């Protein structure tokens, strides 16, 4: 099992006391499988994604990625796990403005010590970026920036890809193009994909579907 989350709980402190966001969530994902994570705003989708990515700490339960228990890892070890095994695609593209397209594409792979120039060149071509490698993020459209963000994530060949509304800022036609490319490339790489989305149309394209309601699996 690539990802195994069991009875995960998370609350945030407020002026009125703890606010429960996740209330005992279970989730399992095998390598090579694609799962949609849906739910209304405030249902805990993004929180769960951040916990799985080791970007925040859960209060109770367990999360294992490729056999490693996040609860047993230090912050430094969590960061190492993200570099080694996890790729994250956010709704906000989070490209590095001082780096051009090719250097943004190579960035995560270099950090992980797994830069493969042939694979990066292949990604650039498949994502329609081959003619704009020397451009900077500010010179790209939203769809082009999102393609760079996806390419940067996949360049490091992660075992698990986490995507949080990756096309939420794009029009429907551009969104479909970007999603088609991402799903194809994820499938070819053999990675597992956990995709947060509000789109039931997109959710139906995944192998599995998990719906959250008020912090619980519905």
Image: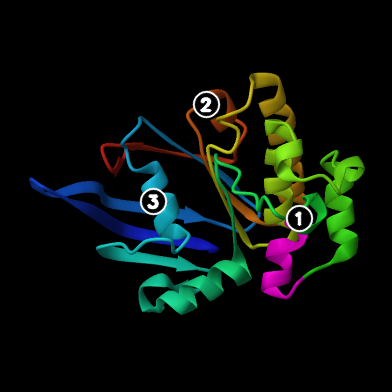
Query: Residue at the spot x=30%, y=57% of the render?
Result: 8
Mark pair 2, 3: CA separation = 18 Å
First of labels 2, 3 by sequence position: 3
Q: Position of residue 108 (x, y in %)?
A: 68, 63
Q: Position of residue 168 (x, y in %)?
A: 55, 30
Q: Position of residue 33 (x, y in %)?
A: 61, 50
First of labels 3, 1 by sequence position: 3
Marker disc for residue 48: 3
| Image position of 168 with respect to 173: above or below | below
Marker disc for residue 199: 2
Residue 99 is inside the magenta segment: no
Q: Is residue 212 left or right of residue 30?
A: left
| Image position of 77 with respect to 123: above or below | below
Q: Which residue is mark 1?
A: 105
Which numbered disc, 3 or 1, marks the residue closer to the eye? 1
Q: Is residue 132 visible to us here?
A: yes
Q: Give the crowd class for mark 2: few <14, some 14-19, many >=20 residues within 10 Å.
A: some
First of labels 2, 1 by sequence position: 1
Query: Residue at the spot x=67%, y=72% of the render?
Result: 112
Q: Is residue 144 left or right of residue 67?
A: right
Q: Give the crowd class for mark 1: few <14, some 14-19, many >=20 residues within 10 Å.
A: many
The residue furthest left is 16
Q: Position of residue 105 (x, y in %)?
A: 76, 55
Name the element at disc 1.
helix
Q: Which residues are magenta?
A: 104-114
Mark pair 3, 1: CA separation = 26 Å
Name the element at disc 2.
loop
């Amino acid at each position: 099992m690539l990802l195994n989350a069991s009875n995960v709980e998370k609350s945030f402190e407020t002026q009125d006391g703890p606010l429960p966001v996740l209330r005992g969530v279970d989730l399992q994902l095998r390598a090579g499988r694609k799962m949609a994570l849906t739910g209304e705003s405030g249902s805990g989708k993004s929180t769960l994604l951040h916990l799985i990515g080791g970007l925040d700490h859960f209060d109770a339960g367990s999360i294992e990625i490729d056999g490693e228990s996040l609860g047993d890892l230090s912050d430094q070890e969590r960061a190492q796990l993200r570099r080694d095994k996890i790729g994250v695609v956010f709704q906000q593209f989070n490209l590095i403005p001082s780096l051009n397209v090719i250097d943004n594409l190579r960035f995560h792979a270099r950090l992980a010590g797994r830069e493969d120039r042939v694979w990066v060149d292949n990604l650039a071509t498949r994502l329609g970026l081959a003619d704009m490698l020397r451009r900077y993020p500010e010179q790209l459209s939203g769809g082009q920036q999102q393609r760079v963000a996806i390419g940067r994530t996949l360049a490091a060949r992660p075992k698990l890809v986490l995507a949080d509304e990756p096309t939420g800022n794009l029009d429907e036609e551009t969104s479909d193009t970007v999603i088609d490319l991402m799903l194809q490339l994820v499938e070819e790489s053999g990675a597992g994909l956990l995709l947060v989305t509000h789109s039931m149309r997109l959710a139906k394209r995944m192998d599995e579907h998990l719906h959250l309601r008020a912090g619980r699996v519905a």
